[in-house]
Image (cartoon, rainbow, N blue to C red):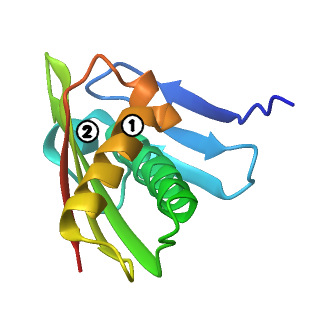
Amino acid sequence: MALTSTATAHWEGSLFEGKGSVNLDSSRLGSFDINWKARSEGQDSTTTPEELLGAAHAACFSMAFSNGLAKAGTPPTALNTTADVTFVPGTGITGIKLTVRGDVPGISADDFAAAAADAKANCPVSKALAGVEITLDAALA
């Protein structure tokens, strides 16, 4: 069974002076402001498409990694993943760095790194972002 998740965006004005919002429709978790200044310079109270993409990638990777570890007989106690998405105005998204630290009893550092690499290569969001360089820093906590 296929599941479709939906988000919407509303924008008013030009790119540089305008503003908008994104809404997480499927989950009904709310609306978040967006604008060019936040995207190109950073701003604490406003999200960006790259931050939302990073959240999706970190979540997807963590789920895939957890599943792979469990299938190998070493389910994680905890995985903490950060996705740093780099955006260059005028160029676009230039890279994503996944950093994961895990508490996984009974696994070697080499096996942890190999399982993390497999999750990076095979999580659905990584596959959707195949045109962007994705790097990985994986270590046991």
Q: Residue furthest right?
A: 1
Residue 62 vs residue 4: left or right?
A: left
How busy is the neighbourhood of tag 1: few (under 14 within 10 Å), some, or many (20 plus)? some
- Residue at the image position 36 percent from the left and 70 percent from the top: 80
Q: Do the residues labelled 2 and 1 touch (CB within 8 Å)?
A: yes
Residue 75 or residue 133, whichever sits in front? 75
Residue 32 or residue 87, whichever sits in front? 87
Residue 122 position within the rendered picture, expressed as x and y whole percent measured from the top left: 44, 34
Up the image or down, 73 lies above or below 129; here it is below
Mark toward the start of the polypeptide (2 vs 1): 2
Mark 2–mark 1 distance (CA, rounded to whole Å): 8 Å
Q: Determine the image quadrant of residue 14.
A: top left
| Image quarter of the C terminus | bottom left
> For the image shown, how many numbered marks are present on the structure?
2
| Image quarter of the N terminus | top right
Residue at label 2?
39
Q: What residue type is labelled 2?
A: Arg
- Residue at the image position 57 percent from the left and 30 percent from the top: 10
Up the image or down, 141 lies above or below 109; here it is below
